[in-house]
Amino acid sequence: SRTLAPWLTLVTLSGTPLTTMDTPGVAASVRLLIPGPDDDDLVIPSWSGNEFLLPSGERPLIRTFTPLRFDAGSGTLELAVVVHPSGSASDWVSSAHPGDRAAVSGPGRGWDPPPGLRQITLLGDASAVPAIGQVVAALGADVDCEVHLAVPSRPPESILAPASNVSLRLHETGSSTASGQALVSAADGIIESRDDCHVWAAGEAAAMQAIRKHLHGTLGIPRDRTTIRGYWKAGR
């Protein structure tokens, strides 16, 4: 692992099975299975038809991430893990050593810029920074992009590169609750000024629900002009 920012750690996974994984799309997802806090080694769960379950009947420890970089040729996958207290993935990364086992499934669906896109507003907390960096990189230079990030500090340029068509607004926060509130407040400032404006938002599930309600219910922005994803739930 390697520190990208005080609140973000890079972890590299490698193995022959990764050479057969499909290349993830923009802002796609993979699921990472890691050993539980009381497990000495990785136990692969089985699919019940509704959920993954361990032989004990318990749910495995699975977290979802945006692939930061993927190289099928070398079977290498890089993930950016948010560092925070009592975070299962964060705790695992901080104590992991080369050779420790994990499992990956995916990738999940990605995001394609809508045809004719000219203006987009992106909102996200620390968990969404890798995805937002990929969305920004996928945009044409003629797309007006405004980014709102609720993070402890500016993210590294290796993940979110500056561009002339991108306006970055940082809402520096020190807790997940404050991050969610900052994103909801930023969404409250969005007005439906153009017919071709798109809103992309990702982060804590309750905050995303509030943003969805504001955009669709208050502003009346059509659902096909928004992409809103709950990446995690507070308290889990």
Image (cartoon, rainbow, N blue to C red):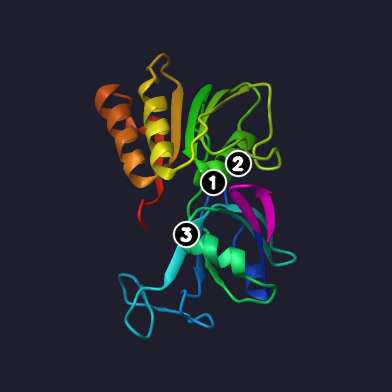
Q: What is the number of the mark on residue 134? A: 2
Q: Is residue 24 left or right of residue 114?
A: right
Asked if disc 1 and disc 2 are in contact, CB closer than 8 Å, the reply is: yes
Camera-near label (3 vs 2) is 3
Of label 1 and label 2, which has the lower sequence position?
1
Residue type (three-letter) at the residue carrying disc 1: Ala
**Quadrant the C terminus occupies:** bottom left
Decide if residue 89 is on the left or right side of residue 13: left
Question: Is disc 2 placed on a helix, strand or loop?
Answer: helix
Count of marks placed on residues: 3
What amino acid does circle 3 point to?
Gly
> Could you tell me residue 150's position as x and y percent?
49, 35
Q: Where does residue 233 sit, x and y in percent of width and height?
A: 36, 52
Task: Tell me what residue is drawn at x 45 percent, y 21 percent.
Answer: 196
Give me the disc on residue 98.
none
Dot 1 falls on a residue whose secondary structure is loop
From the viewer's side, name the closer residue of 16 and 163: 163
| Kind of residue indicated by mark 2 | Gln
Which residue does the image show at 68% across and 29% down from the upper left?
162
For residue 27, the mark is 1
Does the magenta portion include 152? no
Work out which residue is located at the far right of the displayed protein and give it.
74
Where residue 43 appears, x then y in whole percent?
48, 82
Instruction: Read off the residue under disc 3.
Output: 87
